[in-house]
Amino acid sequence: MFTRKRTIFAATVLLAMTAAAAIAETPNLGKPIDEAAIAAWDISILPDGTGLPKGSGTPAQGAVIYAQQCVACHGDNGRGGAAAALVSDQKIAGINAGQKTIKNFWPYATTIFDFIRRAMPFTSPRSLSDDEVYALTAYILAENKLIGADEAMDAQSLPKVKMPNRDNFIIRFPDRI
Amino acid sequence: MYEARTYSQILPDGKAYRFYFLQEVKSFITSPSHGAKLKGPGLYEISGVAYSGTGRIQKVMVSADGGQSFAQAALQEPVLSKAFTRFRLPWRWDGGPATLQSRAWDEAGNVQPTRAEFVAVRGELAKPAPVLAFPNQHYNSITSWGVATNGEVKHVYA
């Protein structure tokens, strides 16, 4: 009786260990992904500029690309059309939600680069080179008078652009973060 | 980014809430509600749903006089955390004008704000914003249904 109990106990322990080993393994779905394949998708730019690629562009270069790729939806000089205005003189306080624009609402300039590279042009996202995205970012910032008309944007200069609404975001539930 | 830009609630003073998920305690009456027509004076069941992102619904109070007096509604089991909770209360309509409201409390002690309390914090638009402007993220104040003497039920501010 004693021996049988020990056998059952040993079998139970063995079963538990096998189960634990099985959980530690993968479910054998899909295939491993290599670093190069991940890099193509890993394009997030952090607010402080982390992740910004090499390259640069000026507002003048951006104006040419804007006329080819963006004006149909975003309107002349970024004043808005079928898609949202990119250039505006909206004030910060007392606006409604439809009046949020880059200049009066976005807290970080680096987001402009991330968004254009990730999502624009609407019909063929990821088709622009990094230089072109820097140029368009510079063009939008210059049209909004947030940088000078001759200022080039690159991985060093773009994070230094201070957006007007930078310090106006408050946390609704500080104790839940 | 799109979510942060579109769904970050702006406040009257120019500040904005950083994007957040939590839905605060809220309730609204689904029957009778806007568009309904009561056939005549008599007994009706007021029913609606309440929910809270911070836990279970503790109680729901219902008013038929625009918030001057309230009665506690029955909650349909099971009452689960962060889940729609059905409430109901019998109501005898005398045929006069009435304003139906519901107000919920959750187990964390939060109470659904009145419209006046909500507007005091969030402000009030001079005119309706475009629908695509998503002007009312996390809107959770009391919703009022006005009952006219002919039985028509319409949305009102009260």
Image: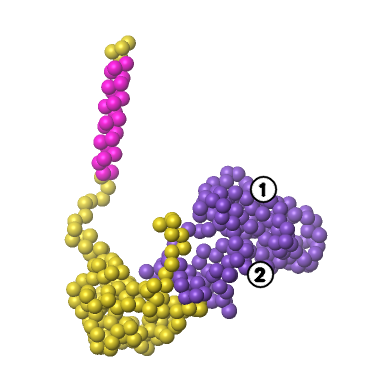
Chain colours: A yellow, B purple
Q: Is residue A6 magenta?
A: yes
Q: Is residue A148 magenta?
A: no
- Please give the name of the residue rendered at 73% of the width and 52% of the height, measured from the top-left corner: B90
Indicate which disc residue B64 carries. Answer: none
Residue B65 occupies which quadrant of the picture?
bottom right
Type of residue at label 2? Answer: Tyr
Q: Which residue is mark 2?
A: B157
Residue A88 occupies which quadrant of the picture?
bottom left
Furthest residue in direction top, as rendered = A1
Is residue B117 at all visible to an observer of this figure?
Answer: yes
Residue A49 occupies which quadrant of the picture?
bottom left
| Image location of residue B30, percent across then percent down | 64, 58
From this view, report whether residue B68 is shown above or below residue A88.
above
- Please give the name of the residue rendered at 59% of the width and 56% of the height, measured from the top-left corner: B111
Type of residue at label 1? Answer: Ala
- Please give the name of the residue rendered at 22% of the width and 60% of the height, measured from the top-left corner: A38
Mark 2 neighbour class, 10 Å CA radius: few under 14, some 14 to 19, many 20 or more: few
Query: Which one is in front, B148 or A149?
Result: A149
| Image location of residue A61, percent across then percent down | 24, 86
The range drawn in magenta is A5-27
Q: Which image quadrant: the N terminus of chain B? A: bottom left
Q: Which image quadrant: the C terminus of chain B? A: bottom right
Q: Which residue is mark 1?
A: B74
